[in-house]
Amino acid sequence: MAVLKVKFTKTRRDKLAQILWILNWISVVTGIILFSLGLFLKVELKKREELMAEKDIQYVPNMLIAVGLIACAINFLGGKICYDCVDSTKFLRWKLIMLPYIVCTFFFTLCVLVGALMCYSMHWELEEALDLGLMQAMRFYKDTDMPGRCFLKHTVDTLQIQFQCCGNSGYKDWFQIQWISNRYLDMSKKEVVDRLRSNVEGKYLMDGVPFSCCNINSPRPCIQQQITNNSAHFNYEHQTEDQNLWMKGCRQALLEYYTHIMQSIGLTVLITWLFELSVLTGVRYLQTSLENVLRQGDPDSESDGWLLENSLMETARTNLSIIKSLGKSNQINTANNGDPNIDVPSTSKAHYGPDNVPPKEKMETS
């Protein structure tokens, strides 16, 4: 029994073909949108790649770019097919192509769905990449005179000002690394030398943060040095008073920024998938109804259209039997050392010896 069978008159078939022609062209536009979104995400990730660990997170935008280009090609062909199917006589040129086209488009819609899910699953990989990348960038913050790292101070300062954040998880992350170069340390001061010697690794650690961590909205002048020393500042208690620093870590700030982008893109891709699936359903109805018209021989007659000619179970069993028969036909008979010609009858005499003479005859002649 056919699944979701619908009866079509000639007028309804023509209208369906016209609507599908329009929808396919709309799908071409959605393909361009997917391509643009993938390109946008790729550029946004590329902007801050020096703040991320070397992880392959570009696969999501690359997937969207590829899906967008394929969507344009598939729906352009679908629009041409639907335009010709308005005339049932022109359907003959597409009759053998439509079923493979529908199957390929079905698997393509699955790729679109995978692309939407990848936008949501990218969160954890991005968080790990940001965690490792930001800590590494902070360690290289002081290396302003080293090639390949001299730009990181500007990058980190710009990040903290633009996203109103400080450190990786918070401002205290700066306490654990030396972010001031030895070039700017006065070695003549005993305090500086003692601080360097007190550290096992010889690093100059202090309870201070770069200027870019300062909260510009705070009414109090920024306290970025000796943050935990209450006596160093007038009317100051660092444990109870709200800091005039950005409290949010940059990892969280960037993760929220990228998560918002990916969720918006994922929702757009999901809507595109539903739209592509609805167009594919309409093309399937058009194909089956036109094939039934050809069987009846009257282009003006009514015809039935369906999604599946048989039930889901029957269709699954049929396809499974086809796959099994194909597998059996490709098997090689390995009963006799795997020789595929073992059962082929020989048309020549047996090869008895060098002179092709039976042993008995050879003895008589000798």
Image: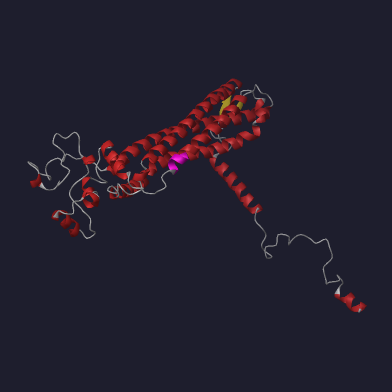
Q: Residue furthest front?
A: 188
Residue 177 seen in render:
no
Residue 236 in which image quadrant: top left
Q: Residue at x 34, y 36 (%)?
A: 260
Q: Residue furthest top?
A: 11
- Along the viewing direction, whichever of 160 and 62 lies nearer the viewer: 160
Is 42 colored magenta in this rendering? no
Number of numbered labels in the structure image: 0
Magenta part of the chain: 59-63
Coordinates of residue 48 in the picture (x, y in percent): 36, 41
Q: Residue at x 14, y 53 (%)?
A: 189
Report the magenta stretch's main SS: helix
- The colour scheme of the drawn protein is secondary structure
Coordinates of residue 125 in the picture (x, y in percent): 37, 47
Residue 188 lies, with reference to residue 301, above or below; the image says below
Q: Is residue 62 left or right of residue 203?
A: right
Q: Is residue 318 left or right of residue 200?
A: right
Quadrant where the C terminus sits is bottom right
Q: Is residue 251 left or right of residue 266?
A: left
Q: Residue at x 54, y 29 (%)?
A: 282
Is 62 colored magenta in this rendering? yes
Quadrant where the N terminus sits is top right
Residue 116 seen in render:
yes
Q: Residue furthest right?
A: 365
- Along the viewing direction, whichever of 324 and 182 lies nearer the viewer: 182
Q: Residue at x 57, y 26 (%)?
A: 7
Coordinates of residue 108 in the picture (x, y in percent): 52, 38
- Along the viewing direction, whichever of 151 and 360 lies nearer the viewer: 151
Coordinates of residue 311 in the picture (x, y in percent): 55, 39
Q: Is residue 87 left or right of residue 129?
A: right
